[in-house]
Image (cartoon, rainbow, N blue to C red):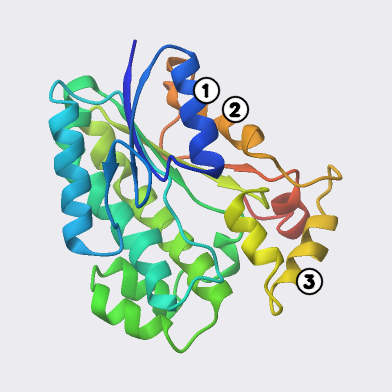
Amino acid sequence: MRVYAMTGGATGIGAELKRQLQTCGHTVISVDIKEGDIIADLSVLEGRKAAVEGIQRLAPDGLDGFIPCAGLPPVARPLSLIAQVNYFAVVATVEGLLGLLKKKKGSVLFVSSNSAPMVAADDPFVQACLTGNEEAACAAVESRDGHTAYAGSKRAATIWMRRHAVEYAAAGVRMNAVAPGITMTPLTDLVFADPELGQVMKEFGDSVPVGRTAQPVDIANTMRFMLSDDASYLCGSVVFVDGGSDAMLRSEDF
């Protein structure tokens, strides 16, 4: 049986993926801000360090996979928190756990979003993230809006994955990203209740080509496959699991 570690395993997609992996007999080390094997605030350097050190302590022989699933929605405030958790915590934990992943030739599965392409790669906020300057990125995003903060953070994290996929593959570690569409989780409920974004989200949900929004199980099913040996040739890929929304919006881009 395998050993996985994940952030954001208490609710939503992360909780469902954890349940599926545990049902298959695997060990899952969960990091979360309120409930998990390791309690850590990933918005700050100390919390990221605690997460990495806690996983190292619980999995000294290595990891078969790591899923940085913790994330904040576009309604989170201040907007800098979105950058800190959705981008900088993801990169810090992936880099910090590389040694454990090398031991077992494990894989890393990022959680992107089908909204990520909606913010350009050359956007100043995205570029500030990619330079690794957390202070500058947080300052850049505070004058923007929640959608840009969320989608931009996911765009930056996905670009980081793509840029480093070859380097990590050479070390025996596959990296990929799943890009969900609207998925009904407690965080999504907050967005639907938001007076500014709620109606937009509802209309976007109503436009999903397959006729419904996703449940966590829809996303976790694909993630479980991407972590498995059946996906051993999948590397540097971004898999959209969004009921056809990305194809609808970007029919000529892939």
Q: What kind of residue is marked 3?
A: Gln
Q: How far apart are marks 2 and 1 (CA)?
A: 8 Å
Q: In this view, does 249 lie above or below 34?
A: below
Please rate how many residues cluster around mark 3, counting C-alpha atoms within 10 Å: few if below 14, some from 14 to 19, many from 20: some
Q: Hey, which quadrant is residue 67 in on the image?
A: top left
- Please name the residue that numbered disc 2 is placed on: 221
Query: Can you tell which mark lies on residue 7?
Result: none
Q: Which mark is residue 20?
A: 1
Please state which of residues 155 and 66 is positioned toward the viewer in this rendering: 66
The number of discs equals 3
Which label's residue is closer to the chain start, 2 or 3? Answer: 3
Circles 1 and 3 in contact, beta carbons < 8 Å? no
- Compared with residue 145, is residue 84 higher up or lower down, i.e. above or below? above
**Alpha carbons under labels 1 and 3: distance apart:** 32 Å
Q: Are marks 2 and 3 in contact (CB under 8 Å)?
A: no
Count residues near mark 1 (Cα–Cα under 10 Å), then give few for <14, some for 14-19, many for 20+. some
**As drawn, is 93 to the left or to the right of 75?**
left
Residue positioned most to the bottom: 143
Kindly report which numbered mark, 2 or 3, lies closer to the viewer in this rendering: 3
Secondary structure beneath label 3: helix
Which residue is rendered at x = 46% and y = 29% of the image?
A: 18
Q: Could you tell me which secondary element the residue under label 1 belongs to?
A: helix
Give the residue type that dot 1 points to.
Gln
In the displayed structure image, the side of residue 98 where residue 119 appears, left or right: right
Query: Of tags 2 and 1, which is closer to the observer?
Result: 1
Q: Mark 2 or mark 1: which comes first in sequence? A: 1
Q: The residue under label 2 is which amino acid type?
A: Asn
The residue lying at 54 percent from left, 81 percent from top is: 145
